Amino acid sequence: MTDQALPPGISPTPAQLAAAANTFALLASPPRLHLVQLMSSGRFDVGALAEHVGLSLPTTSQHLSKLRLAGIVSARREGRHSYYTVEDPHVLSLVEQIFAHIAPDGTLAPDPPLKDPRA
């Protein structure tokens, strides 16, 4: 242990910790994480999302509702359809990084090789 004080701004605030934990809790659901991953590549209506994820329309709608309330997903109505997307670059980066970190078989992907500083 150290008796040194941390400089201001190094440690997250209680509000930041709570918000981060809530975001991770929402993304801890495999179906919701799958939905966010799909929407990171474009916009989809609920029917297309349900089909891609293999869920019923009502179940997909419930997951989308939770993601919308949390501000992770946005929806735009066009006629009779709502199209869902993830526009937050932080969430997009987080999802991209986790899938770069996990290999297709579920194991941890190897770290990329370090660049040779002499190159």
Image (spheres, rainbow, N blue to C red):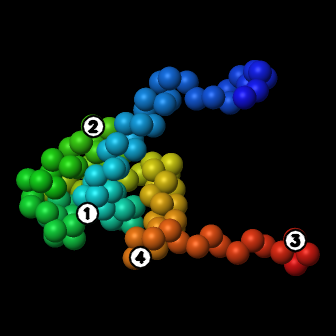
Type of the residue with mark 1 = Phe
Question: Which residue is painted at 70% across and 75% down in the image?
Answer: 113
Give the Cα separation between the discs numbered 4 and 2.
30 Å
Q: Which tag is nearer the camera, tag 1 or tag 3?
A: 3
- How crowded pointer 2 is (Cα within 10 Å; few <14, some 14-19, many 20+) is rated as few
| First in sequence: mark 1 vs mark 4 | 1
Type of the residue with mark 3 = Pro
Q: Secondary structure at mark 2?
A: helix
Residue tagged by mark 4?
104
Please say if the residues under marks 1 and 4 sit with CB atoms less than 8 Å apart.
Answer: no
For the C terminus, the quadrant is: bottom right
Residue 54, position as x, y percentages in the image: 16, 68
Type of the residue with mark 2 = Leu
Give the Cα separation between the discs numbered 1 and 3.
43 Å
Residue tagged by mark 3?
117
Question: Which residue is painted at 45% across and 58% down in the image?
Answer: 95
Q: Say which quarter of the image contains residue 104.
A: bottom left
Give the Cα separation between the discs numbered 3 and 4.
31 Å
Q: Is residue 90 visible?
A: yes
Residue tagged by mark 2?
69
Instruction: Answer with left or right where residue 2 lies relative to residue 22.
Output: right
Question: Which residue is painted at 15% across and 51% down in the image?
Answer: 61
Give the Cα separation between the discs numbered 1 and 4.
24 Å
| First in sequence: mark 2 vs mark 1 | 1
Q: Which tag is nearer the camera, tag 2 or tag 1?
A: 2
Q: Which tag is nearer the camera, tag 1 or tag 4?
A: 4
Instruction: Answer with left or right where residue 44 lies relative to residue 103.
Output: left
Type of the residue with mark 4 = Pro
Label drawn at residue 119: none
